[in-house]
């Protein structure tokens, strides 16, 4: 028999302790579809990740990396703008020289 793969949103809802559709023992009704061990493992994962979500240090590295990448992109845009202006000037001067020869 092949194992049924359950989606992450379903697992999150199944492990959510604040589920509105709870049975009398406090476990969500959707937990009936999964083994008890999986249900409690998902619940533990959810509780660990919720704590990380409100940690002030999480995501700071990503923000600094993003800021560095934005700075690099701005520098590249500036460099390309200068090159474009230089090439425009060269092309226009060559066009003026060729029109003056004729």
Image (spheres, rainbow, N blue to C red):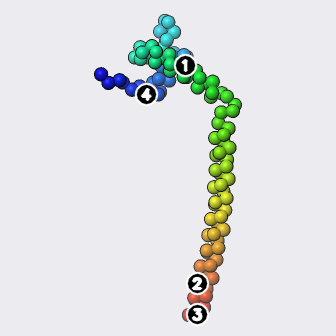
Q: Residues within 10 Å of mark 2 (few under 14, many from 20)?
A: few
Report if residue 29 is visible in the image: no
Tell me the quarter of the image containing the N terminus. top left
Q: How many marks?
A: 4
- Classify mark 3: helix, strand or loop: helix
Question: Along the polypeptide, which appears first: circle 3 or circle 1?
Answer: 1
Gap in Å between the C-alphas at discs 3 and 4?
A: 73 Å
Question: Along the polypeptide, which appears first: circle 3 or circle 2?
Answer: 2
Which residue is at a point 67% across and 28% down the rendered structure image?
55
Identify the residue under disc 3: 101
Identify the residue under disc 4: 7
Question: Along the polypeptide, which appears first: circle 1 or circle 4?
Answer: 4
Give the label on residue 16, or none.
none
- Classify mark 1: helix, strand or loop: helix
Mark 1 vs 4: CB contact within 8 A? no
Identify the residue under disc 2: 95
Gap in Å between the C-alphas at discs 2 and 1?
A: 72 Å
Question: Along the polypeptide, which appears first: circle 4 or circle 2?
Answer: 4
């Amino acid at each position: 028999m092949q194992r049924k793969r359950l989606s992450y949103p379903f697992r999150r809802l199944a492990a959510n302790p604040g589920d509105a559709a709870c049975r009398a023992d406090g476990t969500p009704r959707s937990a009936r579809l999964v083994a008890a061990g999986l249900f409690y493992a998902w619940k533990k994962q959810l509780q660990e990740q919720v704590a990380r979500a409100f940690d002030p240090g999480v995501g700071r590295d990503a923000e600094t990396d993003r800021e560095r990448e934005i700075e690099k992109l701005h520098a590249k845009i500036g460099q390309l703008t200068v090159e474009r202006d230089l090439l425009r000037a060269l092309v226009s001067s060559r066009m003026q020289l060729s029109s003056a020869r004729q």
